[in-house]
Image: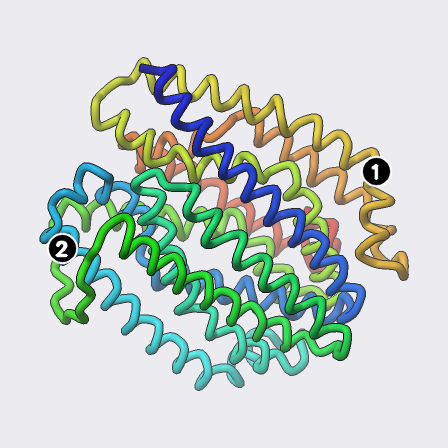
Amino acid sequence: MIEKMLKLIINQTTWGIFGSIFGFAIGFLLKIYLINIVGLESWGKYISAQTLITFIDILISISIPMVIIKFISKSKLIDSIGTNLLLNKIFSYSIYASIFTVFSLVFLSGIIDTKIYSNLSDFKFFIIFMSFHIPLTLFSSIITSLFRSVLKIKEIILYGTIINVSVRAIATFIVFMFTKNIFYFIIIELLSSFVSIMILYYVFHKKVFNFNFAITHDFSISNEIVSYGKKIYLNSLLVFFSGKSLAIIVSLFLEPKLIGVYSIFLTITGVSMFLNKNLRKVFSPAVAQIYENKDFSLLNNLYKETTFLINFLTIPISIIIIYFSNNIVYLFDKTEFINEYIFLLHILILTRVISLLFGNTGVYMLMAGLEKNDLYIQIFKTFFTILLSILLIKDYQLNAIV
């Protein structure tokens, strides 16, 4: 049984790794190209707006992607009436929530700019442009979760990642030969995401599950789904704050150039984490199915095998990044402003290595009925992360965040 499950995971992970490498490599080069044109300050403002929008996405998503993965599996798609009804409720809610959120952000952008992000000039324009990412991100997470729930990673990579990344990269390269305005990049992202989502929706509708979409005002859902959704929703908020609270604090307290530096460091350290993130996406449905069958021995073996695979492939990459770190950061900033902070990059990479040693513990806890345990861990981590950052950032700036 374990050999069969590992074979399935490795098969899906092969496509996932290909998509991750393709997306990360193109994205990495694209950021180098773009940052050298628009500058650290504009890039820092863009990242701040992106962090804000990501938080709002999580707020209105109410854990829908994880609910889809947990409750809409290949076997449950047989119940076409029940699945169709649930998907209509999900899509209807997403439409209403997206429209309300976009209008609210556009209306409140000036207040958010002056009262909250006072350290960033003209930030309201970034909020307005980035707000249109919300419906696209929400629908993208729903569609990709549907594919993941039936273990079709290949389709996500072919029709999602490759098309989205390629269109965005080609358009950015051409457009920024004639401009330095970063708002054009936001528009390019919106258009490429829209094209990718439409293709994914069409493929799922035609080849996986042919459901009839209709807007509904009835959002009543079974108690089992609601109960699970509440736990995951709270957990997702805590995960966001534990992982992104530093980015939020950086956006609120530091100057745009330092925000840009921190973003670049996260991009570089992301090289060592792409496989870990990809594996989480691939085998979370498999973990849920194994737990449902109460095969705890298989879960234990699966955890050991995947943790070994992650460490075997990613720790050497981390060592290489540290060795060539000076050359890598120079690609992003020719002014050498970033060089005085390079020791912080080394610290970030070491923390990533420590994290990798523990594998995907969080995914196993969430998919295997241990949501409360993971919740307590996230609360503890989030509280101390935010507290220490706020206390230290004014005196130690970027040093405190790392």
Front position in the image: 400 or 88: 88
Which numbered circle lies on residue 221?
2
Q: How many numbered tags mark residues here?
A: 2
The CA distance from mark 2 to mark 1 is: 52 Å
Which of the 4 image quarters holds residue 210?
bottom left
Q: Counting other residues with Cα less than 10 Å from the Cα at mark 1, is it few (<14), some (14-19), or many (20 or more)?
A: few
Query: Image point 37% across, 75% down: which residue?
Result: 101
Identify residue for label 1.
Answer: 324
* Residue 223: x %, y % from top left: 12, 48
Which of the 4 image quarters holds residue 174?
bottom right
* Residue 354: x %, y % from top left: 61, 29
Can residue 114 be seen here? Answer: no
* Residue 391: x %, y % from top left: 63, 54
Outermost right residue: 335
Q: Counting other residues with Cα less than 10 Å from the Cα at mark 2, is it few (<14), some (14-19), or many (20 or more)?
A: few
Colour setting: rainbow
Front position in the image: 377 or 33: 33
Q: Secondary structure at mark 2?
A: loop
